[in-house]
Amino acid sequence: MTEEEFDATFTYTLDVLLATMAEEPEIDPEKFYNMACILENLRFFSPVLYGVMQQKKD
């Protein structure tokens, strides 16, 4: 898997998680906001995560 493929898949997965949480009426809006910030930070570090996974494979 290339870095671009990883980034696209990772971004899609985070977007699906966010959309699923947004549709759930039981989730507290403040907790939703906090989780959205965490997911955004994970998205930002996607290249770092990919690099770590590649190092583990080698």
Image: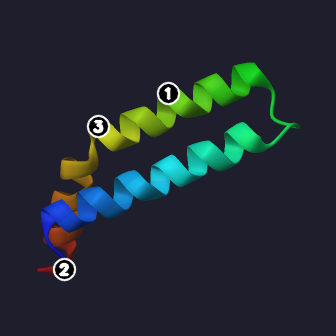
Front residue (pair 46, 26):
26
Q: Quadrant of residue 4?
A: bottom left
Q: Residue 38, how many percent across, how many down?
A: 49, 33
CA separation, marks 3 and 1?
Answer: 11 Å
- Residue 57: assigned label: 2
Left/right placement of residue 28 relative to residue 16 reads: right
Residue receiving disc 1: 37
- Tell me the mark number nearer the camera, choosing from 1 and 2: 1
CA separation, marks 2 and 3?
Answer: 22 Å
Where disc 3 sits, the SS reads helix
Residue receiving disc 3: 44
**Residue occupying image coordinates x 34% and y 42%:** 43
Front residue (pair 22, 51):
22
Q: How many marks?
A: 3
Front residue (pair 50, 7):
7
Q: Residue 3, how many percent across, how many down?
A: 15, 63
